[in-house]
């Protein structure tokens, strides 16, 4: 299969007229993560080109390099055949590259017209004051020319998401962009807004613009793009004509496993039910239904995995389980007691612990020491206090033990956590959460972005904990991880559970990919089996 | 070792900020003065040296008055340390000091107790009043999400005018020309350590004791720990199961109590009647001091000394040369600017951080490869 890819790339290279040629791009971040490995990306003039891949596949990094937000570690970039160094976004803009970020970069309190001309506002004769009329005129002219309907006098905070996106696109066009990069443009849009956007993009293409479209939604890609580049694990998996490749082929290339890290574990012997989630529903503040009648159970001694492409409700689900957010409807019980609306210390007292997805936000206090980080859930207990004062000996003892047990590579427990590498920071979080001997462990992306050694260690610790009788709920966008680590598995897509596999050991990537990308789903009876009493 | 280098860097950075600020001051002095060298001499050496025709000698009295001036600012500096550590930008130290002073003064006038006990009761009541008044911005923040910075800042003036009302219309001693209370009872006055007129009272010793207490509180108790963790990362604290709201209130109540205590000690030690007719300014100094001390209680006395020394120097400079005492505002603003600017010398700090990270990474790789060959 690898050879096919190379042949196909060669054919493409021989053709002419590329507006962008990125060759042999590699990017190693300062924390040692290699986000791009020898990637070739070629963009033909006037095409809509998709970059597909899971989160962490390196597509955003590649586009950040093209837009000058990141510098490649090696490789070259040619724009219209000329080698260039894109050192900043303003350099990229001057080369005719515009980017529409997933999170809009607009000033909410200014009007649409003001946002469009921001930083290049027309001035009146005095050269000091903004000529607002002229700004509106510029906005209207461009809106008409590119057929993007906007209201130039409305404040950005008052307009719907779809229009904000058009404002972003116009902002780029007004600045002379000929190449537009759209980062997951449909993630925030309703179906109608999406189809409107597609019409506009096609119209832009007809006017000679080149569009790069980052997404992992298969149907949209098939609908609108001419060609697509698939990325996985920082590498390009090849370039294809959209018409020539099937959806299941794309999904295989996107979510296939690179290196299979085997996890050795005995068969699970699940006993009584610990976590029971029933009919959980949640609509976010942008009126998007993130959880739709989600029901499942996790039993003592088993690892239940939740697979799915990110953004399909997994994050919201975990937030509900730890009272970081409140569901609209439904129940969550741990050992029979409801935990909805309980404060975090009460939830923790019931034996629940959480390895959070975002370790820098929830997992650690970055400028505090390792010691201060590992005691954050237990510092009030009798063991660590002597009268009104801390029992420092006991605290040093505990943190020293955890550093040894969880193989945290640090000079001492007095070291600031932010000085550690990503893998060791995660070990600090895992050490705290696993050493409290939880009844229920929720592990949300427990090994994201960390090195192989730490990954393997953390996975083994989770298995050991579950075999010791802890119920484990594992949420991971890493297909290899959920399949290898889980005993049974559910798949989430669009806020719903779309599949349940009682035994995950026999699963393969192709089947999983189809469920994860919404091409298939099981019947309600099959899914209902995961709701044990 | 690398962390030690970072600490050393922070110390050097503080020193550099002070030196740069003094350099800025020197520039202004050279611009505004006919005799800049005399002015600088008084600014930098005046507070501890007597310049006499027969030679320069160490001025003990002057030195002791500097220590005396530190008493209220150590308290207000500690108060700000505690509140800022919880990431609460509460600026009501000013009002709490005035209120603490006023309450302590009233009890010192109207309560009849034996000396010893009398001062303790007055100071504790002042602390209590300061703590209670801080509940207002703290509870508003926790329950309603109102910015404590805004409410506390406005509250200062409410407190001041309420006190002025009572001072003018209820407790004023009508026999005096100026508006002031009746004199404190002798039993309530806080005596000087050595009766020499420097106003260096036993309050100074109490202030130093509280430096130790607050340092222990912040670094050796579960409450101080919770305050610091909430200040560093509130989401983390909440997720860890800390009572975030309660701790935020606690931090500000403690800040208020320290301020109130400082106010009452100052009033009962320095004066014989209550005669503050406006906010005394110690609360603002407390903010400067806490920033200089990087919110670490142990550094508060040093920062307070620096500020008191500078104040004294500026006073002398204004008296014996032609530079206006407002110069101190410029110096303070400059120090503030250099200290508070996180970006100050950030490039060099980043270099240290990166170098450390790289060395750690190399160490780690070495360890990993070793581990690999062992297994």
Image: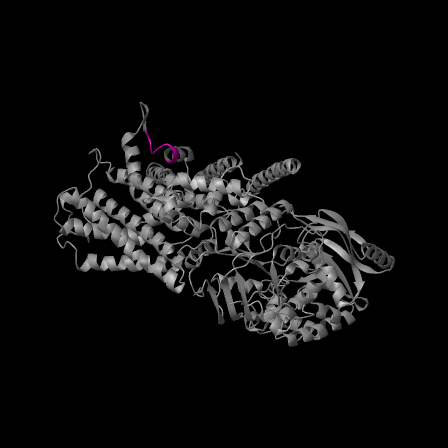
- Residue A25: give x, y in percent of width and height: 74, 50
Question: Is residue B278 covered in magenta?
Answer: no
A25 to the left or right of A493: right
Closer to us: A214 or B319: A214
Instruction: Give left or right: position of B19 versus A258.
Output: left
Where is the C terminus of chain B found, in terms of image quarters? top right
Q: Quadrant of residue A289?
A: bottom right
Q: Quadrant of residue A492?
A: bottom right
Q: Is residue A193 above or below residue A514?
A: below
For image coordinates 20% across by 59% down, the residue present is B166
Q: Nearer the viewer, residue A215 or B112?
A: A215
In screen coordinates, is A484 left or right of B321? right
Instruction: Pinpoint residue B184: horizontal percent, then vertical percent.
Output: 16, 47
Q: Is residue B43 visible?
A: yes
Left or right placement of residue A141 versus residue A10 in this view: left
Estimate the x, y position of residue B124 in percent, counting from the top left: 23, 48
Q: How many marks?
A: 0
The structure residue drawn at horizontal position 23% and vertical position 38%, both measured from the top left corner, is B202
Q: Which residues are magenta?
A: B43-49
On screen, residue A483 above or below B371:
below
Q: Looking at the picture, how far across and down is residue A383, in whole percent?
A: 38, 45
Seen as rendered, the residue at the extreme top is: B54
Way the structure is coloured = one colour
User: Is residue A364 at all visible to an observer of this figure?
Assistant: no
Q: Nearer the viewer, residue B135 or A493?
A: A493
């Amino acid at each position: 299969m690898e050879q096919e890819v190379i042949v196909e790339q060669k054919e493409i290279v021989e053709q002419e007229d590329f507006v962008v040629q990125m060759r042999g791009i590699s990017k190693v971040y300062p924390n040692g993560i290699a986000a791009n490995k020898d990637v070739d990306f070629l963009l033909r003039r006037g095409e809509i080109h998709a970059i597909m891949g899971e989160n962490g596949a390196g597509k955003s990094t590649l586009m950040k390099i093209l837009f000058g937000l990141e510098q490649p570690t090696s490789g070259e970039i040619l724009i219209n055949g000329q080698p260039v160094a894109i050192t900043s976004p303003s350099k990229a803009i001057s080369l005719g590259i515009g980017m529409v970020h997933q999170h809009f970069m607009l000033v909410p309190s200014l009007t649409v017209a003001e946002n469009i001309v921001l930083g290049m506002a027309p001035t009146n004769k005095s050269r000091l004051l903004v000529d607002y009329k002229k700004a509106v005129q510029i906005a209207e002219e461009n809106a008409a020319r590119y057929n993007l309907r906007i209201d130039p006098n409305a404040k950005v905070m008052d307009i719907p998401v779809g229009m904000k996106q058009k404002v972003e696109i116009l902002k780029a066009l007004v600045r002379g962009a000929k190449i537009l990069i759209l980062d997951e443009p449909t993630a925030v849009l309703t179906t109608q807004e999406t189809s409107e956007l597609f019409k506009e993009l096609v119209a832009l293409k007809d006017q000679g613009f080149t569009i790069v479209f980052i997404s992992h939604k298969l149907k949209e890609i098939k609908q609108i793009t001419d060609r697509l580049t698939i990325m996985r694990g920082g590498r390009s998996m090849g370039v294809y004509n959209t018409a020539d490749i099937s959806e299941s082929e794309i999904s295989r290339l996107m979510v296939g496993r690179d290196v299979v890290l085997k996890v050795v574990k005995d068969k699970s012997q699940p006993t009584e039910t610990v976590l029971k989630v029933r009919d959980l529903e949640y609509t976010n503040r942008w009126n998007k239904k993130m959880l739709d009648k989600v029901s499942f159970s996790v039993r003592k001694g088993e690892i239940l995995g939740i697979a799915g492409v990110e953004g399909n409700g997994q994050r919201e689900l975990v937030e509900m389980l730890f009272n970081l957010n409140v569901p609209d409807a439904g129940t969550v019980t741990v050992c029979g007691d409801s935990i909805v609306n309980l404060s975090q210390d009460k939830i923790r007292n019931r034996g629940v612990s959480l390895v959070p997805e975002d370790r820098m936000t929830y997992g650690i206090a970055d400028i505090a020491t390792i010691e201060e980080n590992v005691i954050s859930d237990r510092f009030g207990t009798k063991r660590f206090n002597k009268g009104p004062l801390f029992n420092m000996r006991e605290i040093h003892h505990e943190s020293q033990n955890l550093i040894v047990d969880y193989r945290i590579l640090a000079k001492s427990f007095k070291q600031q956590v932010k000085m550690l590498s990503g893998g060791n920071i995660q070990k600090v979080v895992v050490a705290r959460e696993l050493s409290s001997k939880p009844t229920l462990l929720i592990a949300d992306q427990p090994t994201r972005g960390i090195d192989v050694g730490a990954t393997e260690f953390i996975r083994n610790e989770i298995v050991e904990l579950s075999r010791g009788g802890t119920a484990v709920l594992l949420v991971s966008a890493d297909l290899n991880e959920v399949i290898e680590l889980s005993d049974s598995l559910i798949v989430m897509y669009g806020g719903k559970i779309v599949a349940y596999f009682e035994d995950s050991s026999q699963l393969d990537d192709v089947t999983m990919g189809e469920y994860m990308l919404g091409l298939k789903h099981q019947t309600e009876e099959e899914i209902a089996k995961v709701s044990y009493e | 070792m690398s962390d030690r280098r970072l600490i050393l860097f922070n110390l050097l950075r503080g020193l550099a900020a002070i030196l740069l600020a003094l350099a800025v001051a020197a520039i202004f002095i050279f611009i505004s003065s006919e005799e800049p060298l005399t002015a600088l001499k008084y600014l930098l050496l005046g507070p501890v040296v007597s310049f006499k025709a027969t030679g320069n000698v160490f001025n003990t009295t002057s030195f002791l008055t500097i220590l005396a001036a530190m008493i209220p600012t150590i308290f207000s500096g500690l108060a700000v340390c505690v509140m800022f550590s919880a990431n609460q930008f509460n600026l009501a130290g000013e009002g709490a000091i005035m209120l603490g002073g006023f309450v302590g003064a009233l009890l010192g006038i109207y309560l009849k107790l034996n000396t010893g006990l009398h001062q303790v009761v007055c100071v504790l009541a002042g602390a209590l009043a300061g703590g209670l008044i801080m509940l207002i911005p703290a509870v508003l923040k926790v329950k309603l999400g109102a910015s404590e910075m805004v409410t506390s800042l406005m509250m200062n003036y409410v407190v001041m005018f309420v006190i002025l009302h009572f001072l003018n219309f209820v407790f004023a001693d009508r026999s005096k020309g100026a508006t002031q209370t009746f004199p404190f009872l002798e039993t309530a006055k806080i005596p000087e350590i050595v009766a020499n007129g420097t106003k260096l009272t036993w309050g100074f010793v109490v202030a130093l004791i509280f430096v130790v207490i607050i340092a222990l509180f912040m670094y050796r108790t579960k409450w101080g720990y919770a305050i610091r963790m909430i200040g560093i990362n509130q989401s983390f604290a909440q997720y860890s199961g800390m009572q975030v709201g309660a701790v935020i209130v606690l931090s500000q109540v403690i800040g208020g109590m320290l301020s109130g205590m400082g106010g009452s000690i100052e009033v009962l030690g320095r004066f014989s009647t209550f005669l503050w007719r406006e906010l005394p300014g110690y609360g603002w100094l407390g903010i400067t001091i806490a920033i200089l001390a990087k919110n670490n209680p142990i550094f508060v006395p040093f920062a307070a000394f620096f500020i008191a020394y500078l104040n004294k120097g500026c006073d002398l400079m204004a008296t014996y040369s032609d530079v206006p005492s407002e110069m101190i505002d410029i110096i303070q603003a400059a120090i503030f600017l250099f200290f508070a600017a996180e970006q100050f010398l950030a490039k060099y700090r980043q270099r240290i951080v990166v170098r450390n990270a790289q060395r750690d990474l190399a160490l780690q790789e070495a360890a990993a490869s070793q581990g690999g060959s062992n297994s």
